[in-house]
Amino acid sequence: MEFIKDFPVKNLTVADYNPRVINENSYQKLKESIQKFSIIKPLILNGDNNILTAGHQRTKALKDLGIKFAPVIKLQDIAKSDEIMFNLFHNSIETNGSKVGLSLISELPYGYSFVDFHYINLRKNSNPIVVKEISKLIIKYGTWGSVICDEKGAVITNAEYAIACKLLEKPLLVYKMKNEEIENLKSYLQEDYGKYYFNNLEIKDYNQTFCQMHRLSGEKELKSTTYTKYILPILDKKTRILDFGAGKCSYPNKLRKEGYKIFMYEPFYRQEKSNSFDINKIISFIEDIQKDISKNGLYDIVILDSVLNSITSLEMQHSVLLACNSLLKDNGSLILGTRSLGKATTTMKSKQATNRKRDIEFLDDEKFSVTFRNGVWTKQRFTTKEQLQQELMPYFQDIETLGNETRSNIYAICKNPVRFSKEEYQKALNIELNMTYPNGFKHNKHTDLVDTILTNF
């Protein structure tokens, strides 16, 4: 880590993404804050090319205000998977629950200086999950943040970062302010200087293939609670079933071998031990479904297991739900499982850190979070039972939401599909059954299935 107190603003390079957006009122407030206090939290740069990792809005404000120099922390070789984590932690993780004080603060000058970890006094650690995640980044890249304190040594912002430095025995970068300035600053600290906004990442629908779990295979076998709780107990060998978005197809393949009438569709099915899509297999799913519907009609049950949490937009959710609706008989049922918002939010508030790879989700207004997997950005969406109920209502007359919202998944059983026009069905089916693959490729082998589905209304 290199701290540069006066870095030329003209040399700052904005990253090709920014996971946050800011409204005009907040932006004016940000500029007002910079004019009064200057930059009291350094910008973060990635490498010698001076590309911003955190501080996009402040950099824009600095340039608008004509300010020539700003403090920066320069780190080296930040992995793509960590860039947004730095940005989100730097801008957002300040829960104000933890309490930290600094010794010998009277000896420090006003402004920036480093404090040895011996002088960091931990009084209350209310957010061990946050401290753990911050510590991971410090271990990988060195100290990267800072705190603000008053004349008595009370840490005003980023107490969790100070705790991480204490635990890891690292020096802490401190910005000391006068008490009267702190009182004035507090009103600015309460301002929301941006909301998460992940559309700039331009996440492709086919990236979501890397969200698929390894069901029923290998040493780390993962059972689907949607199947085990709500599907397997009610199945008989007369019921006709379609698993829509079947992932690696472990459950449908197992049930087929046992004599169940189950079909499957996975638009992003990958070749064995490869990241390449198996287009021939995807087309075979479509052809099998088409032959089955031609002979036997629409399905008794459609399964949507861990699909709604892996959409990339609410528009895509609409086409998924409408496609599932179209594949059901009038008395058919959709059974689905998706990620719980309660679990995502309560984990961060937990008093005990876990061994999970990721304990914190940063959510935008639509409750999407992003994760870097296999070299690409992917999305996950979280929801409540109430919100899920509302979002399913346009498509089904009878909806029962199930599950404990403090657990990972919640569920729904939806009956009596609401019928739409053939034009609306056709539009959704053309999207879901003919997805776009890398380089804009489409297989265009879906039309017979679409026509077959529509003739059943």
Image: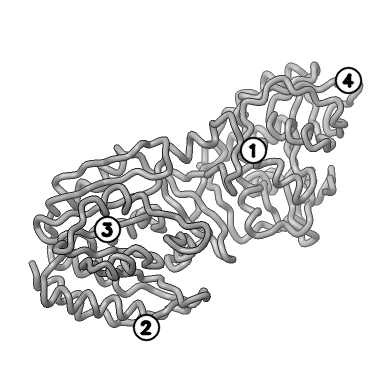
Q: Secondary structure at mark 4?
A: loop
The tag earlier along the polypeptide, 4 or 1, is: 1
Element type where label 1 sits in the image: helix
Cα distance, mark 1 to mark 3? Answer: 51 Å
- Identify the amino acid type marked 1: Lys
Confirm or deny contact between disc 3 and disc 2 (CB under 8 A). Answer: no
The residue at which mark 3 appears reads as: 303
Amino acid type for the residue under numbered disc 4:
Leu
Rendered image quadrant of residue 319: bottom left
Left or right of residue 280, residue 171 in this image:
right
N-terminal of the pair, mark 2 or mark 1, is: 1
Q: Nearer the viewer, mark 3 or mark 4?
A: 3
Residue 325 in view of the camera: yes
Provide the residue designation for mark 4. 104
Q: Which residue corresponds to the image point at 14% horizontal and 54% vertical from the top-left?
A: 417
Q: Amino acid at mark 2?
A: Asn
Q: Earlier in the sequence, mark 3 or mark 4?
A: 4
Q: Which mark is residue 280?
A: 2
Residue count near mark 1 (Cα–Cα under 10 Å), binned few <14, some 14–19, many ≥20: some
Q: Position of residue 359 (x, y in %)?
A: 56, 42
Q: Is residue 212 visible?
A: no
Q: Mark 3 falls on what kind of element?
A: strand
Residue 400's x, y, as percent?
22, 42
Taking the spot 36% from the left edge, 79% from the top edge, the residue there is 281
Q: Secondary structure at mark 2?
A: helix
The residue carrying mark 1 is: 31
What amino acid type should be assigned to the residue bearing mark 3?
Ile
